[in-house]
Amino acid sequence: MSKKLIHDFIVVENRPLNEAHFLLVLEAPAPMPDIQPGQFVEARIDGSPKTFLRRPLSIHDVDYRRNLLTLLVQQKGEGTRHLSRLSSGASLNLVYPLGNHFTLVENQDVLLVGGGCGVAPLLFLARRLFEKGNRITTLMGARSAEGIMEKEKFEAFGAVEITTEDGSMGTRGFVIHHNIWRKRPFAYPRIYTCGPDPMMRAVGRLAKIHDTSCEVSLEQTMACGLGACLVCVVKTNHGHVCTCTDGPVFNINDLTEWLEQNS
Ligand SMILES: Cc1cc2nc3c(=O)[nH]c(=O)nc-3n(C[C@H](O)[C@H](O)[C@H](O)COP(=O)(O)OP(=O)(O)OC[C@H]3O[C@@H](n4cnc5c(N)ncnc54)[C@H](O)[C@@H]3O)c2cc1C
Ligand code: FES
């Protein structure tokens, strides 16, 4: 795992994707270290006195040729609102790359399942899995068509399937209602998922039923991001661990209690 860096990135582009989400394309001041899909940054929110702690954000994409790192951000509170207002040329201080990463397999049929903003860590993952000869299907779910983001970019790496709760795009319902889960034999020996906890639990349970490997990326509340404050602890089958250092990616086989929770 490469060492952690603190860099002032320069905002190259801040592009709205819909009312609540935007893409921040950032240029690194020096060549970026080795970054793995699933890792995240901690962004310092300058000029926002109420936002004392850094905010954790997944690394959405990396372009080593142009030295660019992209974040996909949902505007939630003060910190992300502040980020949404950054314009080209502004500086953004990041600690990165943090956390563990998704397991990269080779030459397999893989299913990526992203709910809403949960697609954020999956694009860089799709890029790396594609480079390793995997056949990729991405299943994206959102409340409505407006919440389906970066579809064309995922299509560059394989098939994209859509579900929306209101039926405005793709299959009506949640990701777990898609036909993909009903086909026998189940086509994917490996699933990667990120999104709201209830969605990931539902996907994890389906993975168990289909006896297929499944990794989830947990978005626990975090403070330090470095394993010091213990805010982000999650109970695994091997004891309590920090999501920021031992995660955010976990195999569902290690999260029996988490998987059984109802919310
Ligand atoms: C590993 C990881 C990766 C993440 N990746 C992304 C991403 O790629 N894109 C994205 O938009 N969001 C991502 N998040 C969630 C993001 O960190 C929070 O939405 C953000 O910190 C909210 O900050 P705020 O100041 O805007 O909102 P606040 O006003 O602080 O809070 C608004 C709500 O956001 C949630 N929240 C607040 N702080 C955190 C926190 N530190 N961690 C998690 N949830 C929090 C709480 O539910 C809270 O009620 C990720 C979180 C984690 C842990
Ligand atoms: S966020 Fe502080 S220990 Fe994980």
Image (spheres, helix red, strand yellow):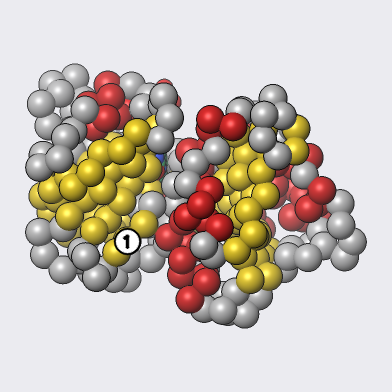
Quadrant in which the N terminus is drawn: bottom left
Q: Secondary structure at mark 1?
A: strand
Amino acid on which the number 1 mark rests in the picture: Val
Is 185 displayed left or right of 212 in the figure?
right
Residue 258 occupies which quadrant of the picture?
top right
Is 263 displayed left or right of 43 in the figure?
right
Whether residue 2 is visible here, answered yes or no, is: no
Residues 177 and 200: in front is 177
- Against 235, residue 103 (above or below) is below
Q: How many marks?
A: 1
Residue 253 occupies which quadrant of the picture?
bottom right
Residue at x-position 10% and y-position 26% = 47
- Against 181, residue 32 (above or below) is below
Label 1: few (<14), some or many (≥20) within 10 Å?
many
- Picture coordinates of residue 46 (x, y %)? 12, 32
Residue under label 1, please give it: 62
Residue at x-position 18% and y-position 33% = 86
- Beta carbon at label 1 within 8 Å of ligand 1: no
Whether residue 65 is visible here, answered yes or no, is: yes
State which image quarter holds ligand 1.
Answer: top left
- Picture coordinates of residue 191 (x, y %)? 65, 59
- Picture coordinates of residue 136 (x, y %)? 62, 65
Residue at x-position 60% and y-position 74% = 134
- Picture coordinates of residue 171 (x, y %)? 75, 38
Is 33 displayed left or right of 61 in the figure?
left
Residues 81 and 56: in front is 81
Residues 173 and 221: in front is 173
- Against 44, residue 27 (above or below) is below
Residue at x-position 74% and y-position 32% = 173
